[in-house]
Image (tube, helix red, strand yellow):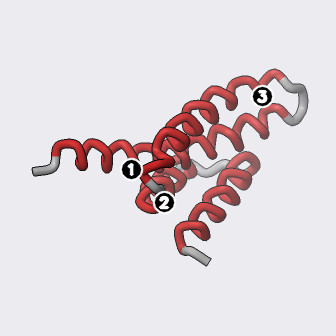
């Protein structure tokens, strides 16, 4: 299996765990994983990754209105959004670099 896919699966597992276990650095860990996994994202998937990051960030607030489990779902989606935002940051940086490289 591709090591980038393994890192992605680990990030999904960490996003779920972060909803139930408080740890100060979950966001940093997920962001760094996203930055690394972003290297493997194909150029044609750039827009899809950026839109996914935006949608996950906005959906995380919607689920807070569901009683009992909404808070946990919102935290999972928020953590997933941080992971995907790291990948989007890598894609954006790569696109800017390719645009202006000498």
Nearer to us in this view, 41 or 44: 44
Q: Residue at x 38, y 50 (%)?
A: 90
Q: Residue at label 1? A: 90
Label 1 CA crowd tier, 10 Å (few <14, some 14–19, many 20+): many
Mark 2 vs mark 3, CA separation in Å:
27 Å
Label 3 CA crowd tier, 10 Å (few <14, some 14–19, many 20+): some
Q: Is residue 24 above or below residue 39?
A: above
Q: Tags 2 and 3 in contact by the CB under 8 Å rule?
A: no
Q: Is residue 19 above or below residue 64?
A: below
Which label was assigned to residue 37?
2
Label 2 CA crowd tier, 10 Å (few <14, some 14–19, many 20+): many
Instruction: Farthest residue to the left: give it.
Output: 102
* Upstream in sequence: badge 2 or badge 3: 2
Q: Residue at label 3? A: 63
Residue 7 pos. (x, y %): 57, 66
* Upstream in sequence: badge 3 or badge 1: 3
Nearer to us in this view, 102 or 93: 102
Q: Tags 2 and 1 in contact by the CB under 8 Å rule?
A: yes
Question: How many numbered discs, if any?
Answer: 3
Residue 11 pos. (x, y %): 61, 58
Mark 3 vs mark 1, CA separation in Å:
28 Å
Nearer to us in this view, 24 or 69: 69
Q: Is residue 95 shown left or right of residue 1?
A: left
Q: Is residue 66 above or below residue 50?
A: above
Mark 2 vs mark 1, CA separation in Å:
8 Å
Q: Residue at x 76, y 49 (%)?
A: 20
Instruction: Farthest residue to the front: give it.
Output: 44
Q: Residue at x 71, y 43 (%)?
A: 76
Q: Residue at x 60, y 61 (%)?
A: 8
Nearer to us in this view, 51 or 66: 51
Q: Is residue 14 shown left or right of residue 25?
A: right
- Dot 3 falls on a residue whose secondary structure is helix
């Amino acid at each position: 299996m591709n090591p980038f896919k393994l890192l992605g699966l680990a990030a999904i597992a960490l996003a779920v765990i972060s909803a139930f276990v408080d740890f100060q650095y979950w966001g940093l860990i997920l962001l760094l994983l996203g930055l690394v996994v972003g290297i493997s994202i194909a150029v044609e998937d750039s827009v899809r990754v950026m839109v996914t990051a935006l949608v996950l960030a906005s959906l995380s607030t919607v689920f807070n209105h569901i009683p009992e489990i909404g808070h946990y779902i919102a935290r999972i989606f928020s953590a997933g959004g941080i992971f995907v935002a790291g990948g989007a940051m890598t894609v954006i940086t790569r696109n800017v670099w390719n645009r202006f490289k000498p």
